[in-house]
Protein backbone atom coordinates (compact mmCIF):
# COMPACT_ATOMS: atom_id res chain seq x y z
CA UNK A 1 0.00 0.00 0.00
CA UNK A 2 2.84 2.40 0.86
CA UNK A 3 4.47 1.63 -2.48
CA UNK A 4 1.27 2.50 -4.35
CA UNK A 5 0.88 5.79 -2.47
CA UNK A 6 4.50 6.79 -3.08
CA UNK A 7 4.14 6.01 -6.81
CA UNK A 8 0.95 8.06 -7.09
CA UNK A 9 2.56 11.00 -5.30
CA UNK A 10 5.57 10.92 -7.60
CA UNK A 11 3.31 10.88 -10.65
CA UNK A 12 1.38 13.88 -9.39
CA UNK A 13 4.61 15.80 -8.85
CA UNK A 14 5.75 15.07 -12.40
CA UNK A 15 2.43 16.26 -13.80
CA UNK A 16 2.63 19.45 -11.76
CA UNK A 17 6.12 20.22 -13.06
CA UNK A 18 5.00 19.57 -16.63
CA UNK A 19 2.14 21.96 -16.18
CA UNK A 20 4.49 24.68 -14.98
CA UNK A 21 6.83 24.29 -17.96
CA UNK A 22 4.06 24.56 -20.57
CA UNK A 23 2.39 27.78 -19.50
CA UNK A 24 0.05 29.36 -22.07
CA UNK A 25 1.54 31.94 -24.46
CA UNK A 26 1.45 35.47 -23.16
CA UNK A 27 0.21 38.61 -24.98
CA UNK A 28 3.71 39.37 -26.32
CA UNK A 29 3.91 35.98 -28.02
CA UNK A 30 0.46 36.42 -29.53
CA UNK A 31 1.30 39.90 -30.81
CA UNK A 32 4.51 38.62 -32.38
CA UNK A 33 2.63 35.86 -34.18
CA UNK A 34 0.02 38.28 -35.49
CA UNK A 35 2.70 40.69 -36.73
CA UNK A 36 4.56 37.89 -38.50
CA UNK A 37 1.34 36.78 -40.16
CA UNK A 38 0.56 40.31 -41.27
CA UNK A 39 4.02 40.72 -42.79
CA UNK A 40 3.65 37.47 -44.69
CA UNK A 41 0.21 38.45 -45.97
CA UNK A 42 1.44 41.90 -47.05
CA UNK A 43 4.41 40.43 -48.89
CA UNK A 44 2.21 37.89 -50.65
CA UNK A 45 -0.29 40.58 -51.67
CA UNK A 46 2.42 42.89 -52.98
CA UNK A 47 4.04 40.24 -55.14
CA UNK A 48 0.76 38.75 -56.36
CA UNK A 49 -1.05 41.96 -57.31
CA UNK A 50 0.44 42.51 -60.77
CA UNK A 51 0.25 41.09 -64.27
CA UNK A 52 2.37 41.08 -67.40
CA UNK A 53 0.94 44.43 -68.50
CA UNK A 54 2.38 46.01 -65.34
CA UNK A 55 5.75 44.39 -66.01
CA UNK A 56 5.78 45.56 -69.62
CA UNK A 57 4.80 49.08 -68.57
CA UNK A 58 7.76 49.34 -66.19
CA UNK A 59 10.24 47.75 -68.59
CA UNK A 60 9.23 50.13 -71.39
CA UNK A 61 8.62 53.27 -69.35
CA UNK A 62 12.05 53.16 -67.68
CA UNK A 63 13.91 53.67 -71.00
CA UNK A 64 11.22 56.15 -72.06
CA UNK A 65 12.08 58.23 -68.98
CA UNK A 66 15.79 57.87 -69.75
CA UNK A 67 15.10 59.23 -73.24
CA UNK A 68 13.18 62.14 -71.71
CA UNK A 69 16.23 63.02 -69.61
CA UNK A 70 18.46 62.77 -72.69
CA UNK A 71 16.16 65.11 -74.61
CA UNK A 72 16.20 67.61 -71.76
CA UNK A 73 20.00 67.59 -71.70
CA UNK A 74 20.16 68.42 -75.42
CA UNK A 75 19.02 72.01 -74.88
CA UNK A 76 22.30 73.01 -73.22
CA UNK A 77 24.22 75.27 -75.60
CA UNK A 78 21.66 74.92 -78.40
CA UNK A 79 18.91 77.39 -77.45
CA UNK A 80 18.38 80.81 -75.96
CA UNK A 81 14.60 80.43 -75.73
CA UNK A 82 13.48 80.58 -72.07
CA UNK A 83 10.40 78.49 -72.91
CA UNK A 84 12.49 75.64 -74.28
CA UNK A 85 14.84 75.75 -71.30
CA UNK A 86 11.92 75.79 -68.88
CA UNK A 87 10.17 72.90 -70.64
CA UNK A 88 13.39 70.86 -70.55
CA UNK A 89 13.55 71.29 -66.78
CA UNK A 90 9.87 70.48 -66.47
CA UNK A 91 9.91 67.21 -68.42
CA UNK A 92 13.03 65.93 -66.63
CA UNK A 93 11.77 66.73 -63.14
CA UNK A 94 11.05 63.59 -61.13
CA UNK A 95 12.08 61.17 -63.89
CA UNK A 96 14.97 59.66 -61.89
CA UNK A 97 12.72 59.07 -58.89
CA UNK A 98 10.08 57.35 -61.03
CA UNK A 99 12.77 55.21 -62.67
CA UNK A 100 13.85 54.08 -59.19
CA UNK A 101 10.26 53.26 -58.24
CA UNK A 102 9.60 51.19 -61.35
CA UNK A 103 12.95 49.41 -60.98
CA UNK A 104 12.03 48.53 -57.39
CA UNK A 105 8.69 47.08 -58.54
CA UNK A 106 10.42 44.88 -61.09
CA UNK A 107 12.78 43.63 -58.38
CA UNK A 108 9.84 42.99 -56.06
CA UNK A 109 8.10 41.00 -58.79
CA UNK A 110 11.38 39.20 -59.55
CA UNK A 111 11.34 40.40 -63.13
CA UNK A 112 14.46 41.44 -65.07
CA UNK A 113 15.18 45.11 -65.78
CA UNK A 114 14.85 46.48 -69.32
CA UNK A 115 17.15 44.76 -71.80
CA UNK A 116 19.15 46.23 -74.66
CA UNK A 117 16.09 46.04 -76.94
CA UNK A 118 14.26 48.49 -74.67
CA UNK A 119 17.11 50.96 -74.23
CA UNK A 120 17.44 52.29 -77.78
CA UNK A 121 15.71 55.36 -79.19
CA UNK A 122 13.41 53.36 -81.45
CA UNK A 123 10.11 52.50 -79.80
CA UNK A 124 10.25 55.55 -77.54
CA UNK A 125 8.54 57.90 -79.96
CA UNK A 126 11.91 59.07 -81.27
CA UNK A 127 14.45 57.38 -83.53
CA UNK A 128 18.24 57.71 -83.65
CA UNK A 129 18.13 59.84 -86.80
CA UNK A 130 15.88 62.40 -85.12
CA UNK A 131 18.24 62.58 -82.15
CA UNK A 132 21.22 63.07 -84.47
CA UNK A 133 19.40 65.91 -86.24
CA UNK A 134 18.74 67.59 -82.91
CA UNK A 135 22.40 67.29 -81.96
CA UNK A 136 23.41 69.12 -85.16
CA UNK A 137 20.82 71.91 -84.84
CA UNK A 138 20.87 75.16 -82.89
CA UNK A 139 18.88 78.35 -82.47
CA UNK A 140 15.30 78.59 -83.71
CA UNK A 141 15.72 75.49 -85.88
CA UNK A 142 16.65 73.50 -82.80
CA UNK A 143 13.72 74.94 -80.85
CA UNK A 144 11.18 73.79 -83.43
CA UNK A 145 12.76 70.37 -83.90
CA UNK A 146 13.13 69.85 -80.17
CA UNK A 147 9.60 70.85 -79.28
CA UNK A 148 8.19 68.62 -82.02
CA UNK A 149 10.35 65.70 -80.88
CA UNK A 150 9.38 66.17 -77.24
CA UNK A 151 5.65 66.40 -78.05
CA UNK A 152 5.82 63.16 -80.05
CA UNK A 153 7.87 61.46 -77.35
CA UNK A 154 5.49 62.47 -74.56
CA UNK A 155 2.46 61.45 -76.62
CA UNK A 156 4.03 58.02 -76.94
CA UNK A 157 4.33 57.95 -73.15
CA UNK A 158 0.63 58.79 -72.82
CA UNK A 159 -0.31 55.79 -74.96
CA UNK A 160 1.90 53.49 -72.89
CA UNK A 161 0.35 54.73 -69.65
CA UNK A 162 -3.19 54.43 -71.01
CA UNK A 163 -2.55 50.79 -71.89
CA UNK A 164 -1.58 49.78 -68.36
CA UNK A 165 -4.48 51.82 -66.97
CA UNK A 166 -6.84 49.70 -69.04
CA UNK A 167 -5.43 46.24 -68.35
CA UNK A 168 -2.87 46.52 -65.52
CA UNK A 169 -3.41 45.03 -62.07
CA UNK A 170 -0.79 46.68 -59.86
CA UNK A 171 -2.35 49.51 -57.87
CA UNK A 172 0.92 51.49 -57.53
CA UNK A 173 1.75 51.09 -61.23
CA UNK A 174 -1.70 52.12 -62.44
CA UNK A 175 -1.74 55.07 -60.03
CA UNK A 176 1.58 56.26 -61.45
CA UNK A 177 0.28 55.74 -64.98
CA UNK A 178 -2.77 57.87 -64.22
CA UNK A 179 -0.58 60.71 -62.98
CA UNK A 180 1.58 60.41 -66.10
CA UNK A 181 -1.40 60.65 -68.44
CA UNK A 182 -2.58 63.87 -66.79
CA UNK A 183 0.85 65.50 -66.68
CA UNK A 184 2.07 64.41 -70.12
CA UNK A 185 -1.15 65.45 -71.86
CA UNK A 186 -0.86 68.90 -70.30
CA UNK A 187 2.75 69.19 -71.48
CA UNK A 188 1.88 68.07 -75.02
CA UNK A 189 -0.97 70.58 -75.27
CA UNK A 190 1.29 73.35 -73.98
CA UNK A 191 4.02 72.49 -76.49
CA UNK A 192 1.56 72.39 -79.39
CA UNK A 193 0.45 75.92 -78.52
CA UNK A 194 4.06 77.09 -78.46
CA UNK A 195 4.82 75.43 -81.80
CA UNK A 196 2.06 77.46 -83.44
CA UNK A 197 3.72 80.64 -82.16
CA UNK A 198 7.26 80.12 -83.48
Image (spheres, grey):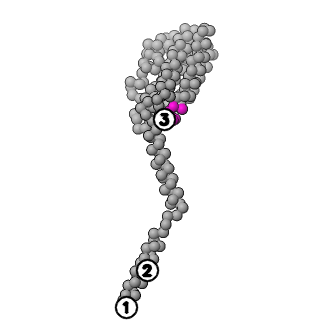
Measuring 47% from the left and 11% from the top, which residue is drawn there?
A: 133
Element type where label 2 sits in the image? helix
Q: Position of residue 161 (x, y in %)?
A: 50, 26
Q: Name which of mark 2 and mark 3 comes first in the sequence.
A: 2
Measuring 41% from the left and 38% from the top, which residue is drawn there?
A: 110
Residue 22 visible in the shown view: yes
Marks 2/3: CA–CA distance: 60 Å
Marks 2/1: CA–CA distance: 19 Å
Q: Name which of mark 3 and mark 1 comes first in the sequence.
A: 1
Q: Position of residue 132 (x, y in %)?
A: 46, 13
Please give the range of residues in magenta. Answer: 171-175
Residue that numbered label 3 is attached to? 170
Q: Name which of mark 2 and mark 1 comes first in the sequence.
A: 1
Residue that numbered label 2 is attached to? 13
Picture layout, residue 57 above or below residue 9: above
Tag 2 and tag 3, C-beta contact below 8 Å: no
Element type where label 1 sits in the image? loop
Tag 2 and tag 1, C-beta contact below 8 Å: no
Provide the major secondary structure of the magenta segment.
helix
Amino acid sequence: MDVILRTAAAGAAVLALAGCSSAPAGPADADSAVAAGARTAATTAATAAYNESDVRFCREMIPHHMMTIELAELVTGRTTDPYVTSMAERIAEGEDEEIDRMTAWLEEWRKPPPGEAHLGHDGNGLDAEAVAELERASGRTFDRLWLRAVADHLEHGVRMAETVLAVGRSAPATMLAGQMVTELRADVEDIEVRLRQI
